[in-house]
Amino acid sequence: MGEHLSLFVNPRVSQADAPPQECAQVLEPRDCAVASAEIRTWPGYRPTPLRPLKAMARAAGIDELLYKDESTRFGLGSFKPLGGAYAVYRYLLRELSARGIVEPIGFAELVGGKYADIVSKLTVTCATDGNHGRAVAWGAQTFGCACVVYIHTHVSEAREAAIASYGARMVRVAGTYDDAVERAARDAQTPRWQVISDSSYPGYTDVPRDVIAGYTVMIDEMLTERALERAPTHVFVQGGVGALAAAVCAPLWWRYGAARPRMIVVEPENAACLFASAVAGRRVRLGGDLKTVMGGLACGEPSLIVWPLLSVGVHGFMHLDDNAALDTMRRLAAGEGGDTPIVGGESGVAGLAGCLALCSDTQTAGKLGLDRHSRVLVFGTEGDTDPELYARIVGESGEQVRARQTSSGSA
């Protein structure tokens, strides 16, 4: 096994045609359909590209490598608006319904200020490593409610400023992401405050379900618009608290049944709570500072509602050191072998980095059937959301990479 790669092949993975019934609390097909129908009406919506990385696939020794590029989603630089902003919208609908407003309410009614006298008195809040907070703040600003965002010690000043630019009040908490989560939950006991999080805990499950449902728009785009001409054999997806992984796992399981792609969750070695939970056979909370360059994945505990699904739906759990992500960012930006140059952020390339690392170790890759016939799907979940850090890592700015992308005719 490679020096910087650890893989756990899940002995509990299910071969059933559909997720077990007890997993239905995470997500149902109707949730995904409602989210997709709503989000597709939002101004600025357009499907993000699914980019073939042909040269990188050849170098890795696999048949096909597809990269779902979320770096342009709603101009926020990551996939997070699909979940964070959508969950803000759903929360506001519930509040209006509780006040007896039962007529259909869409994007236009909220943005137009029809219910501003109610909405303006509500506050959404969250903890974040950067991208989720930006999405929640954007949603709050768009729909007209207030927003307070909690960040932890290791969140960069650039990411803090980006969130604040959408009108959020910022609170920095000493410690880790999980410390910020706990502080946000305590402060949200204030009347008319609501936590908007992709992580769940006892008594808090409705909002995380909305977040996950929003994330599934990425899968819906690929399946309904026939971007996936052939079903992938393998899917590599970032870890974190597991919400994104759940949003990928369930729809692919519904679509392909027992023949679904093998799914591998990738985490930083210093914040691998899903890996540790898989090994233990139960949800595990990690200690320590969880520090990693893949800051968006620096989470110490799996989400309560997603673990039952991931524990039987994921084929393999792996973790990598930070250098694997940094090298992958540079390779994507270079556009090696004629591939489209792509701006991929530190957390956004984790799935691809995991795929490349596993392919470089043929003996370990064989444990999951990863070989020259494999068709792999990965999710590029962020771009240069911290432009200065990105430029330091890659050696050129995101704008320079995008300029080469445009000149190649692949934008």
Image (cartoon, helix red, strand yellow):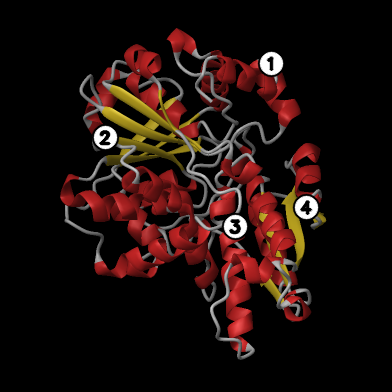
Asked which quadrant contains residue 402, the reply is: top right
Q: Residue at x 40, y 61 (%)?
A: 32
x, y percentage for residue 218?
44, 47
Amino acid carrying mark 4 in the image: Tyr
Alpha carbon of mark 4 to alpha carbon of mark 2: how far?
Answer: 38 Å
Label 3 near label 2: C-beta < 8 Å? no
Q: Residue at x 54, y 35 (%)?
A: 348
Q: Residue 56 or 361: which is nearer the viewer?
A: 56
Of the pair 358 and 94, the residue shown nearer to us: 94
358, above or below 132, in the image: above
Contact check, label 3 and label 1, Cβ < 8 Å: no
Residue that label 2 marks: 229
Residue 236 shown left or right of residue 47 in the figure: left
* Labelled disc at residue 166: 4
Q: In this view, does 94 lie to the left or right of 369?
A: right
Q: Which is nearer the N-term, disc 4 or disc 2? A: 4
C-alpha distance separating marks 2 and 1: 34 Å
Q: Cα distance, mark 3 to mark 1? A: 30 Å
Residue matched to label 3: 84
Nearer to us in this view, 303 or 270: 303
- In primary-sequence order, the first of circles 4 and 1 is 4
Query: Which badge, 4 or 3, is on the more N-terminal residue?
Result: 3
